[in-house]
Image (cartoon, coloured by chain):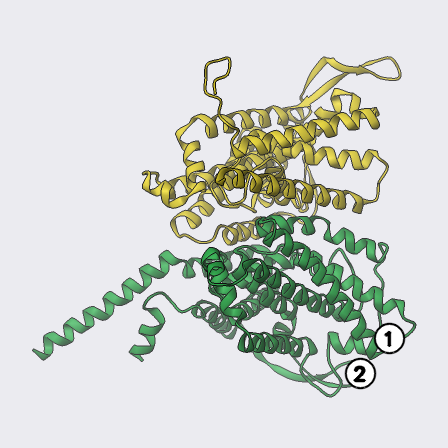
Amino acid sequence: MKKITKKLFQGGLSQLTIPLIAIALLLIFNLIRDPGFFSIGISHNNDGNAVLAGNLISIINGASELAVLAMGMTLVTAACKGQDISVGAAAAIAGSVFVKVLKAGSSISGGTVLLAFLSACVVAMLFGTFNGILVSVFKIQPMIATLILYTCGRSIAYWINGGATPTVSSHIITAIGSFIPGIPIPTPVLIVLFVAILFKLLFHFTSLELFTQSVGINQSAARLNGINPTFIKLLSFIILGVCVAVAGTIGVSRLGLINHETLLLDVEMDTILAVAIGGNSLGGGKFKISGSIIGAYVIQMLTITLYAMKVSSTDVKAYKAIVIVILVVIGSPVVKARLSKLINSLFSKKKVAVKGVQS
Amino acid sequence: MKNMFGKRREPLTDTQLLMTITIGIFAVMYILAMALLGGGFLHTQQIFDMLNDNASLIIVSCGLTIVMIGGGIDISVGAVTSLVVMSCVLYLNNGGNVFVSILLALGIGLAFGLVQGFLISVLEIQPFIVTLAGMFFARGMTTILSVNPQKVDHEAFNRLRDAKVEIPWLGYVAKNGNLVPARLEIGVIVAAVVVIVIFILLKYLKLGRNFYAMGGNQSSALMLGINVKKTRFLSYLISGVLSGISGYVFMMHTGAGNATNAAGMEMNAIASSIIGGTLLTGGVGNVIGTLFGTLTLTTIKKIVVSSGLNDPWWQSITTGGMLCFFILLQSVVLSKRSKKKKS
């Protein structure tokens, strides 16, 4: 037990400790407030399928877009020492393209959905490449480079569908957005799982993780060791582009319509927050994708908890801010150092006392 | 090489170069607008209107420029402006006094500056996260105060709001033969004072030079004996106070509190600073450049509107395009210079 605590606290807290503590605190808080919060039941949706329902399910389901975006953002943050603030706008573009292609065909079948998704992917990757070239070739700070797309992205999305907010209704779209018949788990959750496995495989079979970290830690040193920093940075933005397309598709499928003004509004800030709560440094370098995913769930759990406490959707932000500040204060390097010092001194005092008894 | 004043001629610094480019482009753009579009652009009032509308943006951008020179970022400014407007409006409507409302505005700004500065400089938390939380908090508090738009109904304040500086000799003769004097709002004078004070602070005072040193290289600044923690704290404090002032100026311009006030102002302020030649990496920047950055941004929007492109999406696409142009220009110019220096 002592060994575990030592491992946890000595030399700074482990990266995943803070997000896990946050989840634990939120769970305990909810348990005290209302144990009914955790009830998971099986209900029947409009199509008559048996599906899981409950607050926990809606948390895991609702955080899907955020989790997918946070995975891509982690990579960009690690490689480029900065964040992409255009993900919300880019997702609106990807969603618009998705709907545009779906609407172009006469009927919606599995093939057209796949085609629409692939074209959304291509467009999102193109915009990712645009951001990536600005960052990697022209050496512009990521936040500034993506400010361009942040400013005009939703206008481009407006232009794609001519200002309309077309709806798509098809059982395939419903299946992507909510439940596949026969499977009680929400489809977006399965998509997140799939994307996470893809990332895991990518890191397992390629050296991308190592290369990204070395570019983030010291670009010149990485270059001297034969890594091409320009390519790694560009690649991170293209991968984020794919994540953006996936998030946009989930967002559109959930509602069955594209609204370029409100689709994933303000998601960029939440995404960056998820990366930071996950214990990743926003200054680049070492990263853990799993941390960011947990960070996304922390944010969603916080939001749902506040909703459950009857806080109105516009006021949620204020309470969210307080919790975020508490979290980052606990996770800050200064507080961490103080804390580990305190714990060390406690342990060493005990040791001295024990030795005194023995002698 | 000596010039006629017998002083050694020094090459332009990065800051001066970027600022000169911005001022040049602003001048060219405005003259082109005058020549091609004519109309409103020929009157002095057009510039004055731009200043009237953007006084609060200029003030906020000045604060952000200081933070960015110090190598940080503050994205809470727009939300704090909005919170200040809402709380002052509610205070005045409940029978408050104008002088106290000014203190209230300053107090809110100061409080945000103090807390954010403490968290960032003493606890060493990433500035983006802290100010993001500040932004969420201020936006949330604004809607908690009131979801519905509130109009100021206060006699003394209305007098202050309607007070304008009239300059007859810059006016123009309207179609009906009356002389319409050029009008400047009080907010513009406040903004001008802020720009001048910040300019002097950055250029001639020790604290201002410390901001540049800290943003340029934190470790060398520390070795030079600069108290980096205190300097960083002060940069966020100044930004917070300026957001408070900006909120009051915003209220003097609109006279109403609304939860969506100053939406997206932080991004506009960042864009203004960048167009004005401030680098987000720190150490480079100038407040005069920021002033012209704001004006350039506004001129683009005015030109788009007066060219008859009334669709709302044209504005943001052209703004995005211009931003792209400026950013690329800066990047190319700076990389060429650094190559020259090396060779």
> In x, y percent, where is residue A325?
48, 56
* Colour assignment, chain A: green
Task: Describe residue A282's horizontal placement relative to residue A6 as left or right.
Answer: right
Quadrant position of the N terminus of chain A in the picture: bottom left
Circle 1 marks a residue in which chain? A
Tell me residue B190's x, y (percent). 58, 26
Give the farthest residue toward the front.
Answer: B343
Q: Which residue is mark 1?
A: A108
Up the image or down, B233 lies above or below B153; here it is below
Q: Residue at x 65, y 34 (%)?
A: B294
**Chain of the residue under label 2:** A
The amino acid at mark 2 is Asp
Check disc 1 and report its element: helix, strand or loop. loop
Check residue A47 in the rendering and tell me which mark sits there, or answer none.
2
Is B25 drawn above or below residue A94 in the view shown? above
Whether tag 2 and tag 1 are in contact, CB under 8 A, the answer is no
Is residue B183 in sight in this rendering?
yes
Give amino acid for label 1. Answer: Ile
Q: Are marks 2 and 1 on the same chain?
A: yes
Disc 2 on helix, strand or loop? loop
Residue A194, picture quadrant: bottom right
Residue B240 seen in render: no
The residue most toward the right is A106
Q: Residues within 10 Å of mark 1 (few under 14, many from 20)?
A: some
Of the pair B54 and A146, the residue shown nearer to us? A146
Indicate which label's residue lies in the foreground, 2 or 1: 1
Does residue B221 sit above or below A119 in this rendering?
A: above
Q: Quadrant of the C terminus of chain A?
A: bottom left
